[in-house]
Amino acid sequence: MIKKSIIALSFATTLLLGGCASTPEGDGFVTLLDRGKGLENWEAIGDANWRVEDNLIVADKGKGGFLVSRQRYKDFIIRAEFWAATDTNSGIFVRLSNPKTVTADNSYEVNIWDIRPDPKYATGGIVNFATVPVPPIYFAGGKWNNMEIEAKGPMLSVKLNGITTATLNNDKFAEGPIALQFGAGVQGALGGPIKWRKVAIKPL
């Protein structure tokens, strides 16, 4: 009888942990989005058609939209896994001042856009703050990528597939939610899809 009770308790604990919206990942990381799960941690704004497809969070239609985290963050490390096409316009916005209006003017926008018309803020750059080489040398299109963003006080750094693409010392934005983007393509045309496989954050 005691043995059955222990088994039942263990099973119930497993179910409880498996159903958590934000599951600890180890090393202090908390999962915000993982293979189609975790949309309860986000609020969608704009008209992008965010959905779960093939265990991924996907958007590929609309004039533009965002998934905005329900929590605010100050100092952190973000690790994200994503797939983008060459003409995908996407990015990760951090320390949003206004979660209802997401722009590069009220947050730090870490860009994912290989063919951005102004290439100095193409993939791997921080729009309006930290440029990348021109012509661009960092590309995300047509493959799975890993992006890591670290923000600690005024210091920000970006890594794409293990390579540091941008660093910044700036204190304009100190704290706020993060956002994942599906944006319009060149001259407002429909660009390629963005597919998020995993997003995890470690508060510092």
Image (spheres, rainbow, N blue to C red):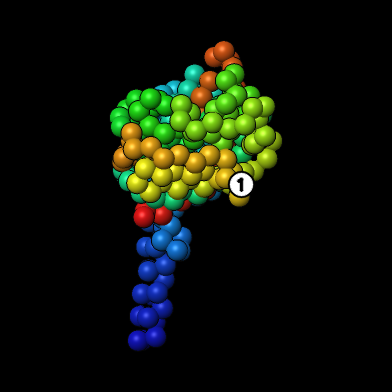
Residue positioned 63% across, 24% down in the render: 115
Q: Residue furthest top?
A: 187
| Residue labelled with disc 1 | 163
Residue positioned 67% across, 34% down in the render: 137
**Quarter of the view holding residue 82:** top right
In the image, is 11 to the left or to the right of 188? left
Mark count? 1
Helix, strand, or loop for circle 1?
strand
Q: Which residue lies furthest to the front in this view?
A: 169
Give the position of the N terminus as an image quadrant: bottom left
What kind of residue is marked 1? Ile
10 Å crowding of disc 1: few (<14), some (14-19), many (20+): few
Residue positioned 67% across, 27% down in the render: 135
Residue positioned 68% across, 40% down in the render: 143
Give the position of the C terminus as an image quadrant: bottom left
| Residue 7 horizontal/vertical position (percent) | 41, 78
| Residue 187 horizontal/vertical position (percent) | 57, 13
Asked whether the viewer can see residue 43, the reply is: no
**Quarter of the view holding residue 58:** top right
| Residue 63 horizontal/vertical position (percent) | 49, 19
| Residue 51 horizontal/vertical position (percent) | 50, 35
In the image, is 35 to the left or to the right of 28? right
**Quarter of the view holding residue 179:** top left
Vertical comparison of 193 with 157: above or below: above
Task: Report the front residue among 160 and 8.
Answer: 160
Task: Report the front residue among 180 and 35.
Answer: 180
